[in-house]
Image (cartoon, grey):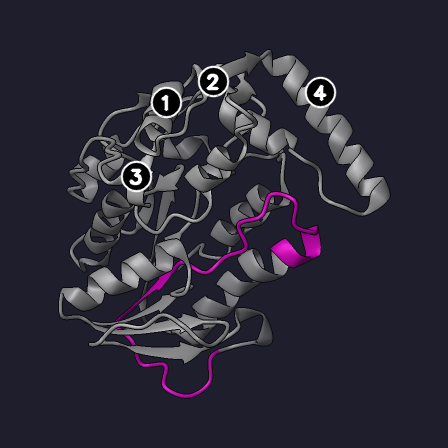
């Protein structure tokens, strides 16, 4: 297949583009700037989705749309321009191509625990971040198209520059203080499992629709973080703060940041993601995409 991959310079987009090129697909990765993603058997083109439709060669069998602004404190206009409007631009730029859209579990209601949520439980009607809201609106842009929407949660693995590195950066002294000490269940998503889901979604025989994507079985978030600390040889222990107190503190920090036109140390969205259960029902992906994910694995995490 001839496949376009947007957001190829990012963690997810780069992994997807490389895996597809390794599988002998004709891949063109797209990103906003140079230097970009590279692969010995693939091409790279500069394209900023916010500047309008792609010009030049647009003949592709499929497009994997990974580009996005993953920032829970981004100004609403900026988040909408990249995530919602950018998705609209992708749809217009690749007429007739099968679209695999990388969405997120953040489209579910973050105000409450997500316990084995199913695809029909989202998108929510209320949001804790502009990221969640704009990604929900991005899904609406795909209505009536031949699109497969994937909703992973907490993507991690080799090349991750956001999830686990940010948590490790929160260590102060020998303490990592988290809401509820992270004693909550999560459906994490290893990058290899997400790539597997993309490859299954690209198969023309699979149906369009929306699918939760995650590792084989939910895990206790605190146990995962303790293993990461151990593998990284970081001498620190996890301590907890009650969820209600953490959420209220984050709200105060957000208000102060708005007044100062700065960025808060943490957000209510971040607290909600760390201190509440976030588990996904992946039965639909197993059945309709023939998705067979591996269990959560931190093998090699000491080198990530």
- Label 2 or label 4, whichever lies nearer to me, is 2
Residue wearing tag 4: 248
Give the structural element (helix, strand or loop) at label 4. helix
Give the structural element (helix, strand or loop) at label 1. helix
Residue wearing tag 2: 238
Give the structural element (helix, strand or loop) at label 2. strand
Viewer-proximal residue among 86 and 164: 164
Q: Are marks 2 and 1 in contact (CB under 8 Å)?
A: yes
Query: Horizontal placement of 259 versus 72: left or right?
Result: right
Q: Earlier in the sequence, mark 1 or mark 3?
A: 1
Q: Are marks 1 and 4 in contact (CB under 8 Å)?
A: no
Name the chief secondary structure element in magenta.
Answer: loop
- Label 4 or label 3, whichever lies nearer to me, is 3
Q: Is residue 190 visible?
A: no
Q: Earlier in the sequence, mark 1 or mark 4?
A: 1
Q: Which residues are magenta?
A: 54-79
Disc 2 from disc 4: Cα separation: 20 Å
Residue wearing tag 3: 302
Disc 1 from disc 3: Cα separation: 13 Å
């Amino acid at each position: 297949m001839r496949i376009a991959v947007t957001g190829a310079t990012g963690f997810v987009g780069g992994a997807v583009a490389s895996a597809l090129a390794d599988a002998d697909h004709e891949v063109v990765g797209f990103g906003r700037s140079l230097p970009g993603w590279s692969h010995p058997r693939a091409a790279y083109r500069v394209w900023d989705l916010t500047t309008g439709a792609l010009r030049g060669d647009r003949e592709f069998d499929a497009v994997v749309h990974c580009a996005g602004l993953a920032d829970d404190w981004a100004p609403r206009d900026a988040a909408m321009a990249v995530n919602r409007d950018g998705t609209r631009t992708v749809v217009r730029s690749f007429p007739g191509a099968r679209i695999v859209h990388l969405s997120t579990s953040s489209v579910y209601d973050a105000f409450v625990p997500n316990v084995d949520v199913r695809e029909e439980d989202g998108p929510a009607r209320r949001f804790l971040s502009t990221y969640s809201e704009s990604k929900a609106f991005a899904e609406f842009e795909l209505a009536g198209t031949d699109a497969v929407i994937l909703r992973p949660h907490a993507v991690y693995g080799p090349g991750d520059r956001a999830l686990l590195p940010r948590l490790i950066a929160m260590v102060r002294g020998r303490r990592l203080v988290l809401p509820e000490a992270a004693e909550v269940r999560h459906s994490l998503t290893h990058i290899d499992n997400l790539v597997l889901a993309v490859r299954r979604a690209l198969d023309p025989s699979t149906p369009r629709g929306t699918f939760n994507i995650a590792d084989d079985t939910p895990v206790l978030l605190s146990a995962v973080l303790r293993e990461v600390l151990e593998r990284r040889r970081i001498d620190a222990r996890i301590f907890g703060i009650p969820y209600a107190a953490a959420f209220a503190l984050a709200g105060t920090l957000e208000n102060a940041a708005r007044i100062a036109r700065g960025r808060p140390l943490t957000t209510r969205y971040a607290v909600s993601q760390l201190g509440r259960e976030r588990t996904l029902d992946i039965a639909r992906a197993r059945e309709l995409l023939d998705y067979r994910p591996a269990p959560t694995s931190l093998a090699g995490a000491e080198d990530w």
